[in-house]
Image (tube, rainbow, N blue to C red):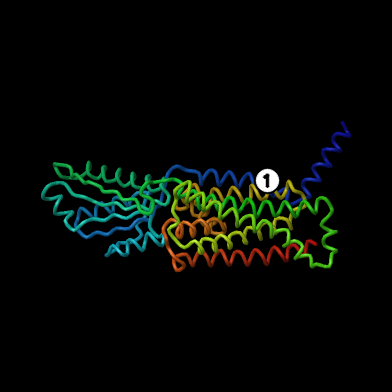
Amino acid sequence: MKQFGAFVRKEYYHIFRDKRTMMMLLGMPIAQLIIFGFAITTEINNTPFAVLDESKGTVSRQIVEEINAGKYFDLYADFHTFKEVETGFQQGKIKLALIIPSSFDDDLKRTGTADIQILADASDPNEASTVTSYVQQILMQYQQSSGSKTPYSIHTEIKMLYNPQLKSAYNFVPGIMGLILMLICAMMTSISIVKEKEQGTMEILLVSPVKPIFVVLSKAVPYLLISFIDVLSILLISVFILQVPIAGNIFLILFLSTLFILSSLALGLLISSVTNTQQAAMLISGVGLMLPTMLLSGLIFPIESMPGILQMISHIIPAKWFILAVKDVMIKGLGFMSVWKEMSVLLAMTIFLLIVSVKRFKNRL
């Protein structure tokens, strides 16, 4: 029993003296619990919407206030022209727009019936279907609670932009690109380099005439080429099999993909510099990168529906900016001027991660 206690103490000291292991064992479950608890929700809240109210009557204003009063929508702006509405959708500032015709209030007073047009960004078909159903439900409740003896009859005309057939592939193709590139670049690069450390062959490679950093980068180059081939394969499959057209510039999509590949490779290099076993590298890559990429990048769940702290965390995830930019170019057909912000963030992240990972690797060696 005494020997057993000694082995228990030895294992205890062995685990607790490794701070990184302790952070993974104690910190990761808490982080994942918080992410799963708050990010995974079937509700869509705080959806930014805009109004083009040509009627400017009392009833139309009451309807807008009724929609904005709940937790599902946040009024972004009152637009004056349809061009402003189109620009809001293209820039991703709004997900839904209400077009109220000039005769709306007069039609209600005269006949008790009027029409409203609802425009939704259907690049994410599930979100578009949900938010339009929310608006219809709010309008129905308003009609039933109207003070007139005869309840209003408001007809809604729904139009889905960018994805009128509501195909889920329009949303998942950019996200799958981000997941696959993160998997190949970050995880496989880190495991490949750590494997050399684990087998004791990294020291042999580093004593060669080539500088150590070039030895490490040379192991990342094959994954760069493989990732680029995967991007081309995904685009071909999306067009010819999934019937998802590429509305924008293909070269801009490839440039965005290259930026994201480089940032993922830098992440893999950084992981390899702080781990010494393949299991640890795989755990950090899988739990620390893959799950946040799936949950906090907007791939599965809308970021607008998450608590503020998780929305802030999502800003440091490269996949979020990549998916946003690829959706704008591939699905909406926008150009460089519409995605320069996402491109700048990806470029800054890539440079920062490369500098940190290279310096960290040199220090470890």
Residue at x 26% of width, y 56% of height: 99
Residue at x 72% of width, y 51% of height: 191
Name the residue tied to disc 1. 26
Q: Examine the rendered structure and indicate whether residue 207 appears above or below residue 309.
A: below
Q: Nearer the viewer, residue 53 or 312?
A: 53
Side of 214 relative to 67 (left or right): right
Taking the view exactly as shown, the residue that stands out farthest to the left is 110
The amino acid pointed to by label 1 is Leu
Side of 157 relative to 14 (left or right): left
Number of disc labels = 1
Taking the view exactly as shown, the residue that stands out farthest to the top is 1
Taking the view exactly as shown, the residue that stands out farthest to the right is 3
Q: Position of residue 179 (x, y in %)?
A: 57, 50
Q: Quadrant of residue 95?
A: bottom left
- The C terminus appears in which quarter of the rendering? bottom right
**Callout 1 crowding tier (Cα within 10 Å): few <14, some 14–19, many ≥20:** few
Side of 78 relative to 46 (left or right): left
Q: Position of residue 30 (x, y in %)?
A: 61, 45
Q: Position of residue 118 (x, y in %)?
A: 29, 51
Residue at x 42% of width, y 63% of height: 334
- The N terminus appears in which quarter of the rendering? top right
Q: Position of residue 24 (x, y in %)?
A: 69, 48
Q: Determine whether the residue tagged by mark 1 lies in a helix, strand or loop.
A: helix
